[in-house]
Image: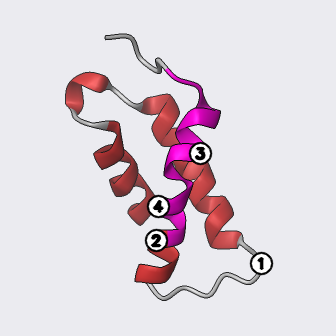
Amino acid sequence: MTKNTFTFEDFFQQNERRIHYYLHKLNIRDPHQEFFQERMIAMWNAYENYEPDKGPLSTYFNFTIRIA
């Protein structure tokens, strides 16, 4: 399997709601969208650094977004 068989835009559209989910779950107020922007960077890093042989991308992204 090749690394990134889809574009970041596709990945972002499919996973943008996860960021909003964590905003809600962690009860974070984000009036200036700082949390959202930091998590977008985490999403980009997850997309760039993902290694398919280590597990599903969604699991890796969930881990990355929580610790970012």
Q: Is disc 4 in contact with disc 2, using a CB cutoff of under 8 Å?
A: yes
Picture residue at 45% right of the left edge, 59% below the top: 65
Badge 3: few (under 14), some or many (20 or more) residues near its Cα, within 10 Å?
Answer: few
Whether residue 54 can be seen here:
yes
Residue 19 lies in the magenta stretch = yes
Q: Earlier in the sequence, mark 4 or mark 1?
A: 4
* Cα–Cα span, label 1 and label 3: 21 Å
Where residue 10 appears, as percent x and y from the top left, is: 58, 34
The relative height of residue 61 versus residue 17 in the rendered view (above or below) is above
Q: Which mark is residue 18?
A: 4
Three-letter amino acid code at disc 1?
Answer: His
Q: Earlier in the sequence, mark 1 or mark 3?
A: 3
Q: Quadrant of residue 1?
A: top left
Q: Which residues are magenta?
A: 6-20
Residue 11 lies in the magenta stretch = yes
* Cα–Cα span, label 2 and label 1: 17 Å
Secondary structure under the numbered disc 3 in the rendered image: helix
Q: Main secondary structure of the magenta part?
A: helix
| Front position among marks 1 and 3 | 3
Q: Please name whichever residue, 56 or 42, is drawn nearer the observer in this view of the structure.
A: 56
Q: Earlier in the sequence, mark 2 or mark 1?
A: 2
